[in-house]
Amino acid sequence: MTSASAAPPPPDRGHDHRWPALAVCLAAGFMTLLDVSIVNVAVPSIRTGLHASQSGLQWVLSGYALMCGLLLVPAGRLGDVRSRRAVFLTGLALFTAMSALAGAAQNETWLVATRLVQGVAGGILVPQVSGFIQQMFRGPERGRAFGLLGATIGVSTAVGPLLGGLLIEAFGPQEGWRWVFYVNLPIGLVALPLARRLLPGPADAPDGAKAAARGAGRRSDLDPVGVVLLGTGTAVLLLPFMEQEEWHGSQKWLLVPLALLVLAGFTAWERRYARSRDPLVDLRLFRQRAYGLGVLLSLLYFAGFTAVFFILTLYLQNGLHYSALQAGLSIVPFALGSVATAAVGGRIVGRYGRPLVAAGLATVLVGLLATALAVHLDTGRSAGWATAAPLLLAGLGSGLVVAPNQTLTLSQVPVARAGSAGGVLQTAQRIGSAAGIAAVGSVFFDGVGTGAHPDWSGGFQAGLLSATALAALALVVALADIRGRRAPEPVAVPVAQEGAGAGPS
């Protein structure tokens, strides 16, 4: 069968809108990612400005992540079945409006409510980005597009803490937190008209994708029972990890087996539903080695590397008394390294496949171990300088993991399934992040201790080694994939299911 990497380019319509359209998608994706990293450093300012409770602050952070995680797969499927552009525009408009309302919040309840709706908007918006990349690009161009997405993730990681620190310094602890939400407004207001003009609509979908979306004669709907089961299972699974600090006692962990039971019911329902209609998640995707192992690798890697930023910020701010701006600057080397290699990784992943991801993971492991050694040798306030070079190395490796793995994982997914398949991958990332922060955070706090002389350096080293172990498991998955693969890994889907909507409808 002919691969899409060898397919001819899409028909020329006079102007190729794909790259400007990608820029709009990346700007919207940047906004949703920025909203995670920038709000983290604004928590002390929110506490001061609104006199918020610890429980309220927890929901400002975890409520956004929870609602976003619940919507990723259903919203991705909605974009697949209906109009990806219409869903994107809805999510973007709602996210922009909620950013304005969050910045204007007058009390804790107001802020938490707007953050929950903002999470819904983020969950609607995010899967459309990977869906559009699948629809508009193929072959090596798709790798480049995912590489730019990876670079965007790196930039948002770097800019978030830094920009948040600068805004709080400029506007003060009472009002500075409002501007971490207002900063989204110009991005959203500029992106909305451009998205409507540039993004491909249903009329731009290729005939093969339309036929696949219709399910070859089978009925295609949104699978409401599947949506409820997946949403319930995901929420119950994420809740104990997100509420670890507020929900004391071991009873909360009983939700984990309950969640697994609900997700098992979801799996059984999807298999039954697929006999006559198009399911929410096509479980046959997991039979593809690239997709199944890619999702698992992503879950493990995000569990490790997301937790590093969590404990590093705590160590610098609470242990070494860094300001929010100083802590943000200390994270920049990792983000810069990730940006430097993400775009390159996207360009060359079609040539090297999964071994490129394995090399990136090995580089991350070396960088994280070097960071632990640096903190062991330098426990003073200069630790931020001591960790700069090791974190840069880890970031260089990370750029070769996130975007290339996403390219490989979605490489054989039909365009008609791009949104829901991407939503599953991103849901795995959210679950990994929540579980990793809970597990690594627990090791970190146990190492710090509760006595009169907390060991912040020792706690950070213990937590960092735990995060490194999770990244090592991701490397094991990558090596298992390489070892079990007899033929070169394809990085494209069949031509009959490809599409390159190149302009507005």
Image (cartoon, helix red, strand yellow):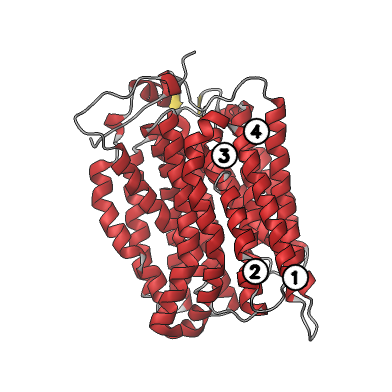
Q: Amino acid at mark 1?
A: Leu
Q: Secondary structure at mark 2?
A: helix
Q: Which residue is mark 4?
A: 268
Image point (52%, 70%), residue name = 329
Compare residues 402 and 231 and report the one nearer the observer: 402
Where residue 24 appears, as percent x and y from the top left, is 32, 48
Q: Closer to the N terminus: mark 2 or mark 1?
A: 1
Residue type (three-letter) at the residue carrying disc 3: Asn
Q: Is residue 405 left or right of residue 198?
A: right
Q: Residue furthest top?
A: 1
Q: Position of residue 196 (x, y in %)?
A: 25, 45
List the single residue furthest toward the left.
14
- Badge 1 local density, few (<14 within 10 Å), some, or many (20+)? few
Q: Kindly identify the amino acid type of the residue bearing the numbered disc 2.
A: Ala
Does label 4 or label 2 sit earlier along the sequence? 4
Quadrant of the drawing holding the C terminus: top left
Real-space CA distance between mark 3 and mark 4, rounded to the nearest whole angstrom: 28 Å
Q: CA distance from mark 2 to mark 3?
A: 30 Å
Amino acid identity at mark 4: Ala
In which quarter of the view is residue 383 placed? bottom right
Q: Is residue 425 left or right of residue 438?
A: left
Give me the C-alpha separation between circle 4 and circle 1: 53 Å
Q: Which residue is mark 1?
A: 377
Horizontal placement of 214 versus 459: left or right?
Answer: left
Q: How many marks?
A: 4
Q: Position of residue 69 (x, y in %)?
A: 53, 52
Q: Eyeballing the image, is 392 above or below 72?
A: below
Tag in front: 3 or 4: 3
Q: Secondary structure at mark 3?
A: helix
